[in-house]
Image (spheres, rainbow, N blue to C red):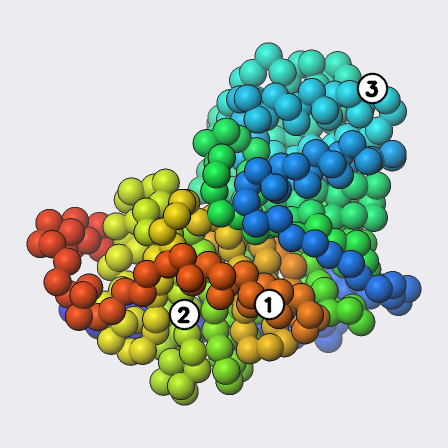
Amino acid sequence: MRKVIEKITGVAEHAAHKVAHVAHKIKKVVGLEPRYEFIDEAPTTWSFATTTEDSWRMLQKAFNEARESIYIEQFLFFPDTIGQQFIELLIKKARAGVHVKIIVDSVGSFPLGRSMYLEKMEEAGIKIKFFNWMLPFSKNSKKLWYFRNHRRLFIIDRSVLLTGGTCIGSQMTEWRETQIQLEGPAVQQAVKVFDQTWKKVYKKRTLNLGIQYKSGIDGFSYITQAPLPSERHVYYRLIDAIRSAKKRVWLTTPYFLPDNRLERVLVLAAKRKVDVRILTPKETNHILVNTGSHTYYDHLLQRGVKIFNYLPCMLHSKTAVIDDEWAMVGTMNLDNISLRYNFESALIISNSLCVSELAEHFEYDLRKSEEITLAEWRERPLLHKIKEAIVWPIRKFL
């Protein structure tokens, strides 16, 4: 029965993908597809932070160096000990004449919207908007509260961008993270995305906030996705890259609950003798999601997909390395909520030096991880199997 249901679901998803693909082509033909090309190419420079603490220090340094503007799009911004440090710094910069604009998700950053710091920030001249309030009839409440803005984007003086999985909150202390700071043509892509999102935050129709660009000479492109099938650009770019993989598919994700298509392309890649490896934390900060993730292991391990559990701490990186010419650093988890319902973003990278650097990160993390074998997995305690059976019917909503 399970196979029949999954087959029917797979056929429906494939049909939806085809429709979205055709719609995308029609838009291009009639000139409705947004295409911003950046002719003035300049060499791109980048650097990485690989822990939350390093990411926060990188952000604070960038904020301190801001002279004109600081733009922030953030899923989770808590006014706790860490958040207060950022709030005080942003207030200081705003009072010094720096233009500060912030978009935060109303659910992920709910405590900020109810804190005493919000008024102080606005008094200092900081402009802040909350995405998709769950309160009925509020000016920016959408039809579905399930649609969350899961992006993390920081733009300094419209010339430097930082993005990755970094949130602002004390609970993320000592996590393994990946954040990239970049200067180059892709920054202007991010600026256009932020400007468009800022204008549409309080409008009812925001499901078309997915944009993709062609990579510049240096091989970096900032793209976004939205819940509409035709706007899932990050997801489709990842799927296409896996389909064309010849050597390796190395994915790092804190939450692994793939939809049918992603699961299928991973299995097909493994059948082509591509080295398919999934790196996830041994224990996540969401127990239900952790259990749901385990329901996929047996099927994938049987078909040659290798799964590793990161041991030292919570792993929150969201990266992909495919062959030697393609990589991704972004906000999208490999779970159904991120793949289907969230507003997400990513840097798509074809710069071989940057791809190589991310591959080194992956290899370093593997040395601190344990591989799960099929034989060992099938010997897990009965209680674990019972929990997985209970969660299995709802895993597509996690």
Q: From where the camera sits, is residue 125 visible?
A: no
Closer to the chain start, of discs 1 and 3, is: 3
Front residue (pair 142, 178): 178
What residue would you read off at disc 3? 95
Q: Does dot 2 land on a helix, a strand or a loop? A: strand
User: Residue 5, located in which quarter of the rendered image?
Assistant: bottom left
Q: Pick out the residue farthest to the bottom.
A: 272
Image location (x, y in percent) of residue 200: 69, 41
Q: Does dot 3 land on a helix, a strand or a loop? A: helix
Residue occupying image coordinates x 18% and y 65%? 376
What residue would you read off at disc 1? 327
Image location (x, y in percent) of residue 358: 58, 63
Gap between marks 1 and 2 measured at Cα: 14 Å
Q: Is residue 280 left or right of residue 143?
A: left
Q: From where the camera sits, is residue 237 visible?
A: yes
Q: Is residue 85 above or below residue 200?
A: above
User: What's the residue type where badge 1 is placed?
Assistant: Ala
Q: Residues within 10 Å of mark 1 (few under 14, many from 20)?
A: many
Residue occupying image coordinates x 51% and y 85%? 246
User: What's the residue type where badge 2 is placed?
Assistant: Arg
Q: Are marks 1 and 3 in contact (CB under 8 Å)?
A: no
Closer to the chain start, of discs 1 and 2, is: 2
Closer to the chain start, of discs 3 and 2, is: 3
Q: Residues within 10 Å of mark 2 (few under 14, many from 20)?
A: many
User: Residue 302, located in which quarter of the rendered image?
Assistant: bottom left
